Image (cartoon, rainbow, N blue to C red):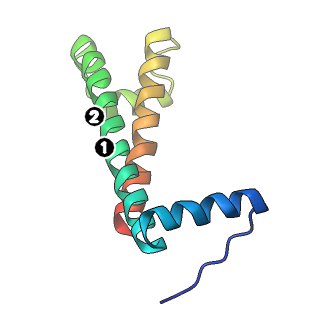
Amino acid sequence: METITLQVQAGTAQKIETIIQAFGNSEQLLEQFLKYHIRKLKREIMRMQADLNKFELKYAMNSATFYEKFENGELGDDKEFMIWSGIYEMQLNCKLKLNRISAS
């Protein structure tokens, strides 16, 4: 077993200790923390995919192709394109986080 040291304020340290006690031990706390965030990221990815699907249907283009064209300046600065691009970037970020967490 390895030890991890965190530098936090005294009040925060007390809160962490209370939470660890509530979960039984630090391993159970971390496991539940990871499971919670994995579920949360998966829900966010699915929600964003539903939004992306609307744009993909409307413009008959998948989001990856759209994003490449948008980033290359081929589509202009339409407000909807900016929203589509933002949602796509957020989804990519969530997928990256999910992959990092799931690999640990």
Whole-angstrom CA distance, mark 1 to mark 2, is 6 Å
In the rendered structure, the answer to whether residue 67 lies left or right of residue 5 reads left
Residue sitting at the far bottom: 1
On screen, residue 25 versus residue 58, left or right, reads right
Question: Which residue appears farthest toward the right when viewing the image?
Answer: 9
Give the residue type at disc 1: Lys
In the structure shown, which secondary structural element does the residue marked by tag 2 occupy? helix
> Residue 97's mark?
none
Q: Mark 2 points at which residue?
A: 46
Closer-to-camera residue (40/60): 40
Amino acid marked by disc 2? Met
For the point 43% across and 64% down, the residue is: 23
Tell me the residue that label 1 is attached to: 42
Above or below 61: residue 26? below
- Badge 1 crowding class, 10 Å Cα cut-off, few under 14, some 14 to 19, many 20 or more, is some
Which quadrant would residue 52 be assigned to in this image?
top left
Q: Nearer the viewer, residue 5 or 64?
A: 5
**Residue 85 spot, x, y in % from top left:** 45, 26
